Amino acid sequence: MFPPAMAGYDRAITIFSPEGKIYQVEYAGEAVKRGWPTVGVKCKGGVVLAAEKRKISALFDPTSLEKIYLVDEHVAISPSGLLADARILIDYARDVALSHRFIYDEPIDVEYLTKAVCNLKQQYTQFGGARPFGVALLIAGIDGRGARLFQTDPSGVYIGYYATAIGADSSTIMEFLEKNYKHDLDIGGCVELAVRALATAVEISDGTNVEVAYATVEEKRVKKMTPEEVTELINKLGLKKA
Amino acid sequence: MFPPAMAGYDRAITIFSPEGKIYQVEYAGEAVKRGWPTVGVKCKGGVVLAAEKRKISALFDPTSLEKIYLVDEHVAISPSGLLADARILIDYARDVALSHRFIYDEPIDVEYLTKAVCNLKQQYTQFGGARPFGVALLIAGIDGRGARLFQTDPSGVYIGYYATAIGADSSTIMEFLEKNYKHDLDIGGCVELAVRALATAVEISDGTNVEVAYATVEEKRVKKMTPEEVTELINKLGLKKA
Amino acid sequence: MFPPAMAGYDRAITIFSPEGKIYQVEYAGEAVKRGWPTVGVKCKGGVVLAAEKRKISALFDPTSLEKIYLVDEHVAISPSGLLADARILIDYARDVALSHRFIYDEPIDVEYLTKAVCNLKQQYTQFGGARPFGVALLIAGIDGRGARLFQTDPSGVYIGYYATAIGADSSTIMEFLEKNYKHDLDIGGCVELAVRALATAVEISDGTNVEVAYATVEEKRVKKMTPEEVTELINKLGLKKA
Amino acid sequence: MFPPAMAGYDRAITIFSPEGKIYQVEYAGEAVKRGWPTVGVKCKGGVVLAAEKRKISALFDPTSLEKIYLVDEHVAISPSGLLADARILIDYARDVALSHRFIYDEPIDVEYLTKAVCNLKQQYTQFGGARPFGVALLIAGIDGRGARLFQTDPSGVYIGYYATAIGADSSTIMEFLEKNYKHDLDIGGCVELAVRALATAVEISDGTNVEVAYATVEEKRVKKMTPEEVTELINKLGLKKA
Amino acid sequence: MFPPAMAGYDRAITIFSPEGKIYQVEYAGEAVKRGWPTVGVKCKGGVVLAAEKRKISALFDPTSLEKIYLVDEHVAISPSGLLADARILIDYARDVALSHRFIYDEPIDVEYLTKAVCNLKQQYTQFGGARPFGVALLIAGIDGRGARLFQTDPSGVYIGYYATAIGADSSTIMEFLEKNYKHDLDIGGCVELAVRALATAVEISDGTNVEVAYATVEEKRVKKMTPEEVTELINKLGLKKA
Amino acid sequence: MFPPAMAGYDRAITIFSPEGKIYQVEYAGEAVKRGWPTVGVKCKGGVVLAAEKRKISALFDPTSLEKIYLVDEHVAISPSGLLADARILIDYARDVALSHRFIYDEPIDVEYLTKAVCNLKQQYTQFGGARPFGVALLIAGIDGRGARLFQTDPSGVYIGYYATAIGADSSTIMEFLEKNYKHDLDIGGCVELAVRALATAVEISDGTNVEVAYATVEEKRVKKMTPEEVTELINKLGLKKA
Amino acid sequence: MFPPAMAGYDRAITIFSPEGKIYQVEYAGEAVKRGWPTVGVKCKGGVVLAAEKRKISALFDPTSLEKIYLVDEHVAISPSGLLADARILIDYARDVALSHRFIYDEPIDVEYLTKAVCNLKQQYTQFGGARPFGVALLIAGIDGRGARLFQTDPSGVYIGYYATAIGADSSTIMEFLEKNYKHDLDIGGCVELAVRALATAVEISDGTNVEVAYATVEEKRVKKMTPEEVTELINKLGLKKA
């Protein structure tokens, strides 16, 4: 895939290749493509995240692992890629959000938070001595501008979407979303679309291997569905495999 | 394009090649050439920026992405190249402009601001341990000397233009500008020229994939046209493709 | 196993390979696979650790070496991999736990402690100038959420398990655990399962080459069995080899 | 020009080649040789600088670019080479000159200022982690010892001249100067000689692509000629090409 | 011994080889294997160290060189490997022991001291910019848990032994110890066993090329035998060669 | 001269070659050998320096360049090699001499000053991150021990001489000095010998391309001869070429 | 001597070779072997140093160079190897000795001083960024334990001797010393033995190319013989060559 002639330009984030690429950042993107997929969908009324929680082993304790993290009352993050890297970024986001509440006595703007996290990511693509973060994030929440949904990548770029997916098989999921997304969805429709989209790439079983969270513009709070609620939803949608 | 004999001189910004070039800076220029194009045009009466906002996906939310950033009331920046790098420089420009207002109680001179940003860029071309910024900027504004328009590149050089373009296909755009620019344009003529020039290289549709901003010498304020205004303009100019 | 074409991408933790892997972290995992095995099993009532203490020499003093370390009254850690690295992490965990007691006047949450240790591990996978920790840990304890059992690896990821194993032949042990684990085990059953599982990979003799520790939800304290108790258990289970 | 056997000695400023050369400094000299030319001429009565300002594009705004910079009332600098590097050195010179006025309440000696700038340059040829400045400077002014004219190079050496040139085709210009310089020139003769010399290497048109500055011993001030004055002079001397 | 294919993984302590080894630490172990041998033996009643002091030259002054160093009244260290490195570690151990006495007003625990020294060693195996210590230590002493004897290696691991040896031919010495060690030895028996064991690998002559030190549990002090006492012992045991 | 097999040992000052040489220091010596020559001669009554000032160009201003620098009233330095490096060392020497006068209220001992300069040089031969100074110095002066003359090289070694030379063709000059030096010279004889010796390697013309300075034990001050005095001397000695 | 297969392990002090050697330290030893020889001899009554001072040139001023340096009243050092490195270590020794006198009001113990110097040397063999000191030292003096004579090498090891030599042809000198040293020598015999030993490797002429210093246990002071005394001794011993 990378011919030997490329060798050398891909050994440090501080080196541009002759075509102006930073290969280390692109390789970090490969770590993202191998991550468990996560999906985000937003509408006027709110925003939804749905993520796979793969069963690593029969003895794995599903309650011990999250794929959707609450950052503040009104914002959640779902990562895909290197999970230890994700944890660092999510803790950073929590610090930024908490400081904001403490200083300004109001919830942080979701885009402002996203930018703070991405500026940190950018620094790890420009300075030597460290590698980029090998993780993409979906950042979803409610703020003064309504429902917000951002996707970030290892380079530190962030872009807003109506619906998007990251991680393994995200292109399959995106295709499904593009065909089925409608701008007049209500929050219930968003939840269903997100889970159906995830099911195109993942062997969904029940609430132990899928997490779902949503926030409505009225409530301005992210709520995580319980495993039981998720199981019920999966059954209702007939998505359970075998 | 780069014969193997060059190998080695292009691995660090701290190395000159035998012909006195810093290849890493030139490779950063390649990242600029792959960026979405942006155009600047100035006249006696004011200055205009027009930039492409490419539709990455059908589900991309165009309101979430800017290609023209207000830095202060009287100055705007439109970047081309690595967007995460651009964000760092634009935030830096905002800090510089704000400090200036705070200390001197007056708007910053546009060239002074440009020089501050470019001095930062230059440092990333001389010291090891970091790569140059992979981004060019058009900096436009109004100050005591009238309408100003500067183009910067990754080396930290800046040059003033009557009309210019950066990013993909900028040479096609430049050719159009050189043929059509007139020194007696008014601000309306500048807006039209900028959008027409952009259309030589970009599949223009409407206000969702083109941003336009302008400032007049009388008002000394940068105004961003609304997507509706941009759509109207595009229709009026008959630039809509297909 | 690693073809020469990989050479170069595996020389620093700050380098991603084209497929998005950090080989130095994966090689650190090999140090873990060569470590003496250790087993963890939890149930509603408590949690158990059982570890091999290999007889390095006939003149080795078994009382001088631990494989299960008390971190606080309610938490213990059993490492596998480079023992000098493990010592650093365990001392760090003790500091974190002690500070928590001092500041909040209550025992630290087991997951919170695990996260602190893993954040330290993660840093050694992202910054140059140091290698990752070549050690995996089983962290077991009792807190407000009951019995907890986490497994960490050199990348800084941690995952909760009902039963798990690390070190040499851990896949053999895991297979045994998956076949024999039952969710209704009591603490005594956990102890027996852990020791039986260890015996599938280790030549068990008596309390000089096996360590066992357990904690019950009622007592919230980790207790290490004496060598005599361990010997008795081994004899009772008929696990003594030859 | 540099046989492959040299490879290796030219990769860092901290490495001498077997023949005692620092190739990185010599390569920085190549950046100077590719710069736009600038000329300096001095006589008893004063000193003159004349520099080319190349028309990069038909839409380039010549008023936005300087090739002769005032450093203090009595000193000016004209650079050739990497313009972003030049800007850093000129700002440094301005700081040094300003501090001197502030502390000693008198204009700085021109040689003292030159030495300060060159000491900074020298440091970038001895310490690793940064490249040398890719720029030569002509530093001209009036001080207690009369008219002064110094040429500096990337190594940090400076030498005084009666007349000299740096940048592209500087050897052609030097030849002209050596044939035509006379020690009894007055300031008007210096101005004419400088512009004529520049014309041997540059396609001179008018005040938009040539800058001229001079200082007389009586006035002790550097004056930049206006573009109109320069145009008039060029016409008078019959130097306009085509 | 090390095939060329290994080349590269053994160039820095911050690099794991594909099989999870840190070759620089293992190579430091080779420096130990080339050191003069030293032997430790402990029993209920006390602990003994015996070390070779090789006659480098006929004019070497044996009184100027120690192979067994008192660290505190109750602890001694005998190194094998790079002697300059050993000196640094022994001075460090003395500082740690002295601080402990000063702060707690009681002799330091021997294992606690050993751990402090080994933590320092570990750091030199994880961070770049320095090499590991090329030295192993036998640390012997008396504390509240009785007679203690630890062996450390360049990786920072320490292990307790009843009897052990480090340095050249240590495997020959170990074989002898394993055959001849008895758990009911008294301190006199320990001294004899240690010297006999050393004699299996070293051409023993008299008190000028062998050092012996011992500590009893009653006295809690390390005593070095005089050269005369050692000579007498060697004669008594009939160990003098030729 | 340096066979390819040497390659690698000559790339850093922190590397000894197998034969115990630091090639980077020796290569710095090559920069000295290519410098303009300078000569020093001492006798009971005083000490003399004579140096070439090569005519770089017909328009070069000889009054702008020194080859003999006063460091304090009683000490002068004449360098050969990289002139920008020399300037740094001479400024350092001036600082040291001035501080000494300020603190002790007496002129600095010439050897003490020489040692200070050479200690700085030595540091640049032992620590990475910088190259050695590519310059040799003749340091001449009068102190309590009479007339002093030291020669330093890039390694930081200094040695006293009755008469010596550095720079291009210094071996030719040394041969002349060895044949013609007499221990009973007076200061006038020293001056003549120094200039004659220089003439064996340099095309001497007049006071514009030779500098001479001397100090007598009675006066304890270094005096530079004026260009006119030097011209007169050259004519008297019949040394003018062509 | 060093086959190409070693290449790579000998490029940094922070790298052990597979056989546990630090080649850079061994190569520094080669610089010692090329140094001018120096000899030390001790007896009950005192200690002697004798060193060659090679005539570099006919015009070299022998009074300007020392090969035996007084460090304190009772201690002297004679180096062999890189003289600029030696100067740094000797200045360091002087500082240590002076501080000791200042703090404790008594002369420093000679071994304590030797250890301080050697600890500094050791650091330059373990940390990157600098090379080892390329110099060996003989340290001789009188303290509470009588006459002391230590030899140090670039690794930081020191060893006491009755008589020893370092530098070029030191093995020839050692052979002579081993044959002729007697333990009942008086100080006069030591002086003669040292000079005779030096003469086996050096073309001795008179007090201009040999330095001798001695200290007696009664006087506790190092005295340097005058050149005249040395000449007389050489004549008396009939050692003058040709």
Image (cartoon, coloured by chain):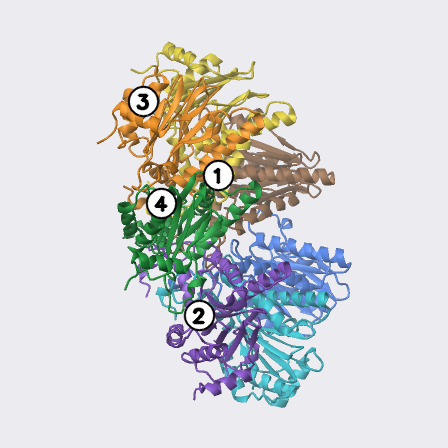
Chain colours: A yellow, B brown, C orange, D blue, E green, F cyan, G purple
Q: CA distance from mark 2 to mark 1?
A: 78 Å
Chain identity of mark 1: B
Residue F211 image-quadrant placement = bottom right
Residue A144: image location, x then y, percent:
59, 21
Mark 1 and mark 3 on one chain: no
Q: Nearer the viewer, mark 1 or mark 4?
A: 4
Circle 2 sits on which residue? G162
Q: Quadrant of residue G93?
A: bottom right
Q: CA distance from mark 1 to mark 3?
A: 64 Å
Q: Residue at x 35, y 43 (%)?
A: E162
Element under disc 3: helix
How busy is the neighbourhood of tag 3: few (under 14 within 10 Å), some, or many (20 plus)? some
Give the residue type at disc 2: Tyr
Q: Quadrant of the C terminus of chain C?
A: top left
Residue at x 31%, y 62% (from the top left corner): G3
User: Regarding mark 4 in the picture, which secondary structure is present there?
Assistant: loop
Chain hosting mark 3: C
In this rendering, the label closer to the viewer, 1 or 3:
3
Which residue, given by chain and number where applicable, does mark 4 sit on?
E186
Q: Nearer the viewer, residue G105 or C162?
A: G105
Mark 2 or 3: in front is 2
The answer to whether any part of residue A30 appears in the image is: no
Asked whether the residues under marks 1 and 4 belong to the same chain, the reply is no
Q: Which mark is residue B35?
A: 1
Picture coordinates of residue G86, whole percent (x, y): 51, 67
Is D185 drawn above or below residue A60 in the view shown?
below
Question: Residue C192 bears which disc, if any?
Answer: 3
